[in-house]
Amino acid sequence: MTYKVIGKRVKRVEDPRLLTGGALFVGDVNLPNMLHAAFFRSDYAHAKIKSIDTSLAKEIPGVVGVYTAEDMGEAWEPGPPLVSPPPTLEGVVFNSRRQVPLVKDKVKHAGEIIAVVVAESRYIAEDAVEEIYVDYEPLPAVTDLEKCLEPGHPLVHDDLDSNLAAYLVQNKGDYEAAKKEADLVLKRKFKLDRGAAVAMENRGIVVDWDQKNQHLMIWDTTQSPIPIRNGMAARLGLRTHQVRVVAPFVGGGFGPKIMMFYAEEMVLPWLTMKLNRPVKWIEDRKENFYATTQEREQVQEVEMALSKEGRILGIKQKIIHDTGAFDPYGLTTPLNTQSHSMGGYDVQNYNSELFVVFTNKIIVTPVRGAGRPQGIYVVERMLDIASKELKLDPRDVRRLNFIPKDAFPYNHEIIDQAFVELVLDSGNYLPAYEKALEKIEYDKFVQEEQPRLRAEGKYVGIGVVPFIETTGVGPYEGARVAVEPSGKISAATGVGTQGQSHMTSFAQIIAEELGVEVEDVSLVSGDTAEIHWGTGTFASRGAVVAGNAVLAAASDVRKKVLKLASKILETPEDELELEGGLVRVADIPEKSISLGELAVLANPFRGAVEPGTEPGLESTKYFGPAYGATAFGVHGMILEVDPETMMIKIHKYIAVEDCGTMLNPLVVEGQIHGGVSMGIGNAYYEKLHYDENAQLLNASLADYLIPTSAEMPHIEVYHENTPAPNNKLGTKGVGEAGAIPVPAAFAQALENALPDFNLEITETPLSPNRLYELLYKSEE
Amino acid sequence: MKPAPFKYYAPQSVPEVLDLLNEYGYDAKVLAGGQSLVPMMNFRLVQPAVIVDINKIPELSYIEPHDKGVRLGAMVRHSQAEKDPLIKEHAPLIHETMPQIATVQIRNRGTIGGSLAHADSSAELVVVTTALDAKFKIQNQKGERLVPAAEFFVGLLTTSMESEDLLVEVQIPPMPAHSGWSLKEVARRPHDFALMGVAVILTLNKKDRCTEARMVYLSAGDGPISAPEAAKLLIGNEITPELITAAAEKAAADEIDPGSDIHATAEFRRHLANVLTRRALEEALQRAKGGN
Ligand SMILES: Cc1cc2nc3c(=O)[nH]c(=O)nc-3n(C[C@H](O)[C@H](O)[C@H](O)COP(=O)(O)OP(=O)(O)OC[C@H]3O[C@@H](n4cnc5c(N)ncnc54)[C@H](O)[C@@H]3O)c2cc1C
């Protein structure tokens, strides 16, 4: 299919507003008579609350109220479960324990909220927080993934027998039988640590209860405004039309902003309805580290059986996944780990045992990548180690194992986050892999560059890692498209927007269908007043699910436009074309009518709209894929390490991605750039340090190190296109792709740079200090 | 992350500052670039009752020749020093130090005086002014005194200044003839406070024998940490690679006292000190011999 607008490098229409400070964020919402909330958060990760004294805080001038769980009465209720365990698996254990608005009796992670202050300013509210006194009985904290299931271990949830949050086994083929045939059986243990998403904009919420109108207005930094609206109405005993949620511009989501409800989201609506005044809370950076969800901590034991040629005969895996103090998001993240632990390889025998455990750490929900980086990390590391053991070229091992082009759709048989057996819809992996090797000049590097640099005393290595990314899961998303009397197009979709360029790429789809300029399309995303049904932005699904809903709605409007124009221009529909905001007769271009005139005619003042037709040139359509679209990519880097100081510099970085049809390559590349920066963080810089009391030791950007622009390499992005067969646009998601392969590619490159050191990396992130230990200290 | 309530003054002259400091004593804090003070206030780690903002005092931002070296007013911004030709010529070690401090944005606000008064043992200027034997001009209502670096920095985030004192100037003596210098450091990201760092100044006589050697370390203890015993290994000798190795090992093993934190263990810091001392001595030696 050749497009005129889709697939073009259209500059983002939202940027001028964003770059000149003209875009609305929740922090910009200031209402008359508005109050400010600040929270008293627990210093302890695990402690019984013996008493709370808020009397001094209440006396501070400007304080309107100080509230604890007790004050909430009937309104006190934990958050809802967001996803349940996959129903199709036998023997699943799942203990649902969800976060609470204000802690009643036992604190389960540092930063949990014990009291809220409402005051005339945030300054006063914070002053009052300092005057709240809580008497705790500290309890031993649960932090160690491997020990926390032992009998007699302290419990996060006292009503459970153990810290087990969930358990399940996924099986494909017969691993034990495959193992008997193997020439090599490798066994390794992996440690994957925790990071934070660190969106530039922290969370925030402004609520305004209008008593006369019986209407609750909520501005929220959420990735899913419609579920927030629905859930909020249900919690508060309101009808959905009494609640409007707006997620205006949101400064980065990366997953944690899909979580609902955060404690603050449960407390503020209650406050505005109680006090009958607007209330605002903006999370500060320190709170963000203690209160916004995190991810990636797992311990894995992996066994891989291979033939001497390097064919993977089977994989056996035990995953211990840390869900933190609660598990509102069910099994999404660890299921993704399982569904990505075979990578893009044809593996017939797989057995994976999953233990999800509660700890006294901050809640875990998906963060960009969402369990996938852990799966890709272990399979790619295992292949690198196997290549060394078998004395094979790591490239050949991958070439041998890729799922071949003609095997698609390929039933992966593993239940993934969509709760059905994962089917890889399409793919063509080998050419993309070869392209990456070519673009990074792999042969030239290992044959010429590397020996030359080594002779100069430089340690430079290369790493190239392929990966799959399941994207575009259901259930559905919707879009409304309408032609205005001005001839301009209005559109709305329920997914929120946090930087993904929806206002441009969705506008391109509409511009393509209706023959208008991209600038003539105005798209609202994230306002429940504009569209009633929807779920949200997550799981790399916007371009697939919402994108195809936009296409469906725009196509339907096109049909309406053609039908009406055909009547007015007295020309059959198939002789008409939409171009430049006009409908015209293809052969007689001067015979035309504008979209605006048609819109007016479609909404007549007098007379009757014909039976069977609707007023206006408007349509609302939904798209719900049976299963997702699986993207593919390959990342490669060349890095230099100083084996004396452990400092690392990435000299070259390339990415080949295949996300099917691209709506806008600029946007795709931007997503890759952002993802890679998170991946580099996960590989080398970013680690949340919890001590044995589950205290977070680096809850600030001075000590939690994110790569800044100064640390980022230049990234070259190349494209392949294997269109998704199950959606009309052929799109596959790409939002999380950039982050997925980086730690694995980093580890491969580092080992490649240091051949004399017998280095084997089985953990991420890898700090300089840790690298020093691996290189110079023999493991005890 | 909002500071506790405080009273705010923005005096226009040094005498006014001194009056305020005299009046409020320990309750007052001087606000220079705010790059260290304001974060600490926002985290409520410090809660001064009174802030005396010295940003409105123009006469503290000079850089002038002084006794073959230079002197800098306390309110000289890091970025001003970084670009200043006098400093480049007369205080090359300072010139090379500036870009290693924080980010451009922070250097545009942060001041020389603020960094020195804050006396963070990880701050480059603290270490470099110690290696250079700089002098600090301090004023209070009663008068003025000049304090050498060795007596200015007295411990963890502590100087010999009292609550009524204002640092007004730092004097950098010239680099002696036949001297070489180097500042080497390792930071997780270039703009972070360094995990370990060392400033080295070597002076040679005409026969290339070492007459003076100074090595001062950052992030290696409660303040700037000197390594006089390692220096003794060098002084009086022609500096060979073996001597450099010995001095680096001596300093790293015996003379510094680094701590452990989430970014680096004491052991790793000692390892880095060893590597960096060697590299810094090599560079300083080359420069002292006339290379660059
Ligand atoms: C992210 C970040 C990274 C940084 N990285 C580095 C780094 O790598 N290396 C480095 O050296 N620094 C670093 N800094 C610190 C920076 O250099 C600051 O500028 C410096 O420490 C303080 O200078 P200031 O002018 O901002 O002082 P302020 O923050 O205003 O004051 C600091 C302290 O000194 C006192 N004070 C200030 N001026 C005077 C005076 N004239 N007389 C008496 N007392 C005074 C204040 O009362 C206060 O107690 C970093 C800062 C940040 C925020």
Image (spheres, coloured by chain):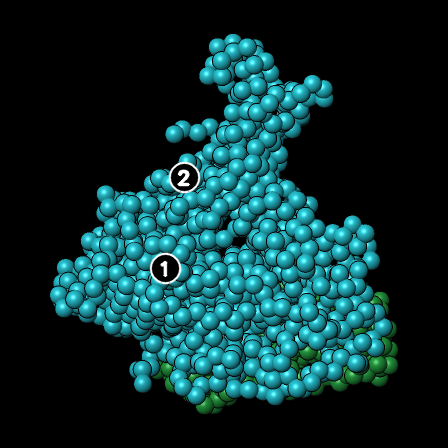
Chain colours: A cyan, B green
Report the chain holding disc 2: A
Point out residue A526 in the picture as x, y percentages from the top left corner.
61, 47
Would residue B196 be found to the left or right of residue A34 on screen?
Answer: left
Residue with the mark numbered 1? A88
Local secondary structure at mark 2: loop
Residue with the mark numbered 2? A727
Point out residue B264 in the picture as x, y percentages from the top left corner.
47, 78
Q: Is residue A284 above or below residue A581?
A: below
Query: Local crowd at mark 2 within 10 Å, few (<14), some, or many (≥20)?
Result: many
The answer to whether mark 2 is within 8 Å of ligand 1 is no
Local secondary structure at mark 1: loop
Residue B279 can be seen, yes or no: no
C-alpha span from label 1 to label 2: 25 Å
Q: Amino acid at mark 1?
A: Thr
Q: Residue at x 81, y 83 (%)?
A: B25
Would residue A12 be found to the left or right of residue A432 on screen?
Answer: right
